[in-house]
Image: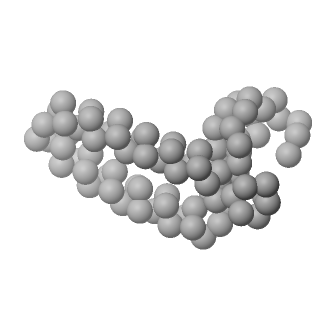
Amino acid sequence: MSDPKAYWFRAKRYGWGWGLPLTWQGWVVMVVWVGMVIPGSIWLSRTNIPLFAVFMATMVIVLAAICYLKGEPPRWRWGGER
């Protein structure tokens, strides 16, 4: 994916990782992810704490994998380049 317009998520300006979505596809991923995390975490935190921890870890891994596959290549950034 060398075309910057094809990236769904922009790399963070400082540090390692991704920032806000660049495209509508990225925004859909974020809305769906938050829409699953909030009710799932509320329900599981009241009923089953170990399952809540597994759920949250899984959701973070899923979002990170999507960002890795569809975002700008991750690397450490010091803030000067874009």
Residue farthest left in this picture: 47
Residue 26, position in %: x, y? 57, 61
Viewer-proximal residue among 71 and 42: 71
Q: Residue at x 50, y 66 (%)?
A: 28
* Corner quadrant of residue 57: top left
Asked if residue 20 shows in the view, the reply is no
Viewer-proximal residue among 31 and 76: 76
Asked if residue 76 shows in the view, the reply is yes
Q: Residue at x 47, y 47 (%)?
A: 63
Left or right: 73, with 34 as reference point: right
Left or right: 68, with 80 as reference point: left
Residue 67, position in %: x, y? 57, 48
Q: How is the image coloured?
A: one colour
- Image vertical order of residue 46 relative to residue 16, above or below: below
Residue farthest front in this picture: 1
Left or right: 28, with 9 as reference point: left
Q: Residue at x 27, y 33 (%)?
A: 53
Viewer-proximal residue among 68 and 20: 68
* Corner quadrant of residue 74: top right
Quadrant including the N terminus: bottom right
- Image vertical order of residue 58 relative to residue 7, above or below: above
Residue 10, position in %: x, y? 70, 51
Residue 7, position in %: x, y? 69, 58
Q: Residue at x 71, y 48 (%)?
A: 72
Residue farthest bottom in this picture: 24
